[in-house]
Amino acid sequence: MGGSPVRPFGEVVVKVHGRCNLACDYCYVYRHADQSWRRKPVAMSRSTMERLADRLGEHARTHHLPYLRVILHGGEPLLAGADFLRYAVRSIRRALPCGTRPLFTVQTNGVLLDRAVLELFLEEEVRVGVSLDGSRATNDRHRRFAGGRSSHPAVVEALRLLGTERYRQLYAGILCTVDVHSDPLETYEHLLTYRPPAMDLLLPHGNREHPPPARPLDDQLSAYGDWLVAVFDRWYDAPVRETRIRLFESLLDLLLGGHSHTEWLGLEPADIVTVDTDGSIEQSDVLKTVAEDAATTGLHLITASLDDAAAHPGIRARRSGVIALGPECRSCPVVRVCGGGLHAHRYDGTGFANRSVYCPDLYHLIAHAHGRLRDDLVRRPGS
Amino acid sequence: MPMLSHDEPVLRTVLPDLPEDLAELLTGELDPRRASALVHALARARGESDAAAEDGTGSADFGSAIG
């Protein structure tokens, strides 16, 4: 380890199931460069889950972690079934020391989220995030079943149920992947109808070698930035808080000298590790968009601890702040806020020391939010 | 007097023309018609709860950059 201290992980993404019941056209697991899902078990086994629980307990004890976020993920995690999900949560809870609070969240497409599953999550204290991209027309452009059928009605039903008084305490929020061809305000206001306590706006994955849809390598264009700015203003100008938007809250907090709450912004080290269905310990899942096995560390729960993973060069590189960035980013006036954007979006076919493929969009958004803050804080009302 | 829990030098780098007295900034009146997001951000800057419990909106944490 070279004598440098190990920075612990605060969040583990657990791939409880490796397949999905939707066929979203932008999915980073199945539709990008990495196809390793084909070689891995369809679902995590109980023995792998036991091993994971032991490793998490070891990590929590070593670092005296006050809490540990556990994201039940996939594929579609609800395909793992209620019995396995209960087993997973109880195994991890049992393995953690009494001073470590587990915070469980499941990130689901919502299709299988019914009353029985929500009763399980109520019992086991698992919060629920649901992926939805907007109105039926917007959502159906990307998030369909393999046969082409719309997923929207099923997801809407799940969100309605999640929003009822009995289950609302479990409602973590909505993750929306931006379709720049959709109307930003219509999309945002559609999502608001499900009364999410929080949401996040994600950009479709891509990089400088393989740019995302409608994101050519042209600094004069910022269609995604324009889209985000429109929603930012709608959110920022609301007289009451209708929902929280993690990307925008992180942006304001960073501009005010605080911290980011997302890997997408800021220079703070990522504290996330992924464990796949076969027990392999991986880097950020999103690296699967870069190249085959780009997220692989070669480490496995049987032979490696999470401290071993924290010392892996790839994971360390994602946690080394400004020195991991390219020269253009290091000299950029907004680098402390932007942080170079998401690691995977900086890839150019050979490495990551580049600007994000979304650099013009991030710059536009940050400059806009900066202007809004300056107007409100420097020229105070009435002054 | 309210203190800023965030990094004040960073804040002053980003917004160099802030008033000298940050306490005034943190406690002063904001236009209530469009101050919700900013009020909550300033509460976080003071290291306070941003009143999530009060308005029922809960935590913004629901997993990281995954979707």
Image (cartoon, rainbow, N blue to C red):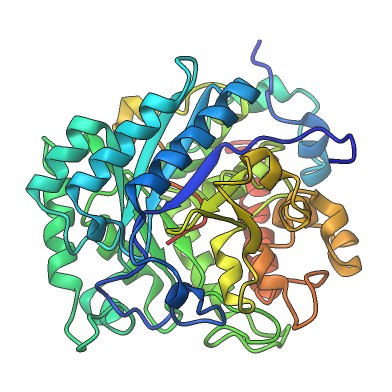
Q: Nearer the viewer, residue A73 or A61?
A: A61
Furthest residue in direction top, as rendered: B1
Q: Residue at x 70, y 43 (%)?
A: A308
Q: Residue at x 51, y 75 (%)?
A: A36
Q: Nearer the viewer, residue A310 or A111?
A: A310
Using the image, determine if residue A82 lies above or below residue B51: below
Q: Is residue A110 left or right of residue A228?
A: left
Q: Is residue A15 left or right of residue A117?
A: right
Count of numbered marks: 0
Q: Is residue A182 left or right of residue A204?
A: left
- Whether residue B35 is visible to the viewer of this picture, yes or no, is no
Residue B18 at x, y percent in the picture: 76, 36
Quarter residue A44 falls in: bottom left
Furthest residue in direction left, as rendered: A115
Residue A115 at x, y percent in the picture: 8, 47
Q: Nearer the viewer, residue A194 or A311?
A: A311
Q: Quadrant of the N terminus of chain A?
A: top right
Q: Is residue A219 left or right of residue A369?
A: right
Quarter residue B24 falls in: top right
Q: Residue at x 64, y 79 (%)?
A: A291
Residue A314 at x, y percent in the picture: 74, 58
Q: Nearer the viewer, residue A93 or A271?
A: A93
Q: Quadrant of the C terminus of chain A?
A: top right
Residue A94 at x, y percent in the picture: 37, 25
Quarter residue A185 falls in: bottom left
- Whether residue A159 is visible to the viewer of this picture, yes or no, is yes
Using the image, determine if residue A213 lies above or below residue A51: below
Using the image, determine if residue A37 lies above or below residue A166: below
